[in-house]
Amino acid sequence: MPRDYYEVLGLERSATLTEIKSAYRKLAVRYHPDRNPDDSAAEEKFKEAAEAYAVLSDTDKRQRYDRFGHQATPTGGGIDPTIFTEFSDILGNFGFGGGRGGPRGSGATLHDILEDMFGFGSRGGGRRRSGADLQYELRISLEDTAFGAKHQLRIPRRERCEACGGSGAAAGSGPTTCRRCGGRGQVLFRQGALRLASTCPDCRGAGSVIRDPCGECRGQGLRERQRSIQVRVPAGVDTGSRLRLPGEGEHDRHGGPPGNLYVAINVEPHERFSRRGADVLSSVTIGFPQAVLGCTVDVETLHGTSELEVPPATVHGSTFVLRSEGIPRIDGRGRGNHVVEVRLNVPRPRDLSEDELEHLRALAELSGDGGGTIRDERGLFSRVKDLFSGHEPDTDPAAGGGGKAERGSEA
């Protein structure tokens, strides 16, 4: 496994861009191959520092690296060589392998050094640079996370121009080597005792110029197009998840492979349910008689309707669990649960009829809250059941009451 990029540069994860540049500059000077001839370890540290700087100096790449590590930060063709331009006083003044019979002479430019390190361009036969990555934010429903779904996306991206084949030149012509830089993409100039390199102003670093540009793409080699892409959202994803679609990003005008498309998932709020990991949360409301006596209620879940047995003497805020009625776990270890919170509906006196209020007063007397005492051997639950069902109290001491068995289990 490659070393942590912050560790390579000797920085904390909260380092600023200025601190990142300063740390890389020191390492580039220390481990530059011309200052450490025939030292393969120093050369590897030189490359390692350049790779770390290429990621941490780019805001988007750094954010992906902080979240997903090395897997989210491709090297080689994924590194933009122009980010090293401000270090041309170091990299442009010292040839990569100069004086050692290496692949480059002492007059190597910045582009030459980066090409040897990461395989830019095609002159060294290395890896070609890929097109730009794209990101699309996809809003999905909670049901999509429970069962998975397919979505059709309309992605604007730059694709290779069909008229010129991506060359940018009109039919019958082609790019010609830039005369100013000789195809290197950079020009050298002196500033005092230093020899510096900068991007060629004629070809803008491409190494070639187009004298007769394509009329369709105006010499860019790429055209903006809308592409329809179907993406499958797997069950179990949550807000913050990201799907990677290789090769669905923008094309590269120099013939490299297309970049990738990253689909950022955002789960929209649900009107009845909320989510906690793989568990789904909801609530049911019952009345005071049901809370005292117990009852059976229908609970709506993502997978249909399930019955929940509420035991007698349930208090407001009690929670019960319906096993495996939640969202599939993204790692395939089954489904989460559906957690139900029971809420007690306490009516206001003005919303009750006089008959209902009379029953409540009688209940208060029977329970001792109104100054009365219970004078028979019957249980309070049976008395409450009679009161709220409209039946006259049963004087048979053998009569009993109770609630139904509980189906769910209290969380």
Image (cartoon, helix red, strand yellow):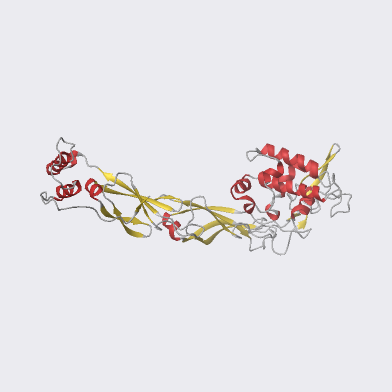
Q: Considering depth in this image, is 297 or 185 the residue closer to the camera?
A: 297
Q: Is 207 left or right of 351, judged from the image as shown?
A: right
Image-quadrant location for residue 215 = bottom right
Tell me where residue 352 appears, x and y as whole percent. 17, 42
Residue 173 at x, y = what percent?
A: 73, 62
Q: Is residue 272 among the parts visible in the rendering? A: no
Up/down of 407 relative to 196, above or below? below
The reply, left or right, for residue 189 in relation to residue 300 is right
Residue drawn at x 71%, y 42% as measured from the top left = 9
Residue 193 position in % (x across, y down): 86, 37
Q: Name the residue nearer the viewer: 71 or 183.
A: 71
Q: How many marks?
A: 0
Image quadrant in which you'd find residue 8: top right
Query: Between 233 and 131, which is closer to the camera in this rendering?
Result: 233
Residue at the top extreme? 371
Name the residue located 77 percent from the left edge and 60 percent from the top edge. Answer: 125
Where is residue 362? Give x, y as percent. Answer: 14, 41
Q: Name above or below for residue 165 compared with residue 353.
A: below
Decide if residue 277 is on the left or right side of residue 37: left
Q: Is residue 318 visible to us here?
A: yes
Report the front residue among 206 and 16: 16
